[in-house]
Amino acid sequence: MVNPNVKWQRYLIGYNPVIVSYLSTYGDEILRQTYERLISAYKNKKSQIILFRFKESDIVSIIRNDEYIYALECLLVLCSNIEKYELCRDIHNQLKIIKLKKARGKLPKAKVTIT
């Protein structure tokens, strides 16, 4: 049985010095997988995904689709703080693309009037 009882924010916002220390030393693969999982879920319009699954337990962290962008922004700040700049670049570029597409979709359409 899977228990979604861990908030993802605890791991991406970066207030916990133990987690930040661990990620800065060993977190390249974890951070990259998290980024790729979020982007894939966003592009495929998944309603929710398991963001983290803890080894040898049934504890997971589930994230809903309305939190994907915020999670990417938190991941960007975390990567910047622990100096993972290559991943920062990828996250920043992807966020920029997402925001441009959203903005493009909100532009009012030109009205054609015949006189």
Image: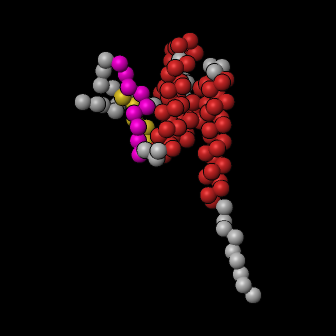
Q: Nearer the viewer, residue 5 or 55?
A: 55
Image coloring type:
secondary structure
Q: Residue sitting at 31 percent across and 17 percent down?
A: 56
The reply to whether residue 28 is in sight is yes
Image height of 38 relative to 114, above or below: above
Q: Residue sitting at 49 percent across and 38 percent down?
A: 40
Image position, residue 18 (x, y; %)? 51, 14
Residue 49 magenta-highlighted: yes
Q: Main secondary structure of the magenta part?
A: strand
On-image quarter of the C terminus:
bottom right
Residue 90 magenta-highlighted: no
Image height of 6 relative to 45, above or below: above
Image height of 115 relative to 70, above or below: below
Q: Residue sitting at 71 percent across and 81 percent down?
A: 113
Q: Quadrant of residue 46?
A: top left
Image position, residue 19 (x, y; %)? 50, 18
Image position, residue 65 (x, y; %)? 46, 44
Range of residues picked out in magenta: 47-55
43 displayed left or right of 105: left
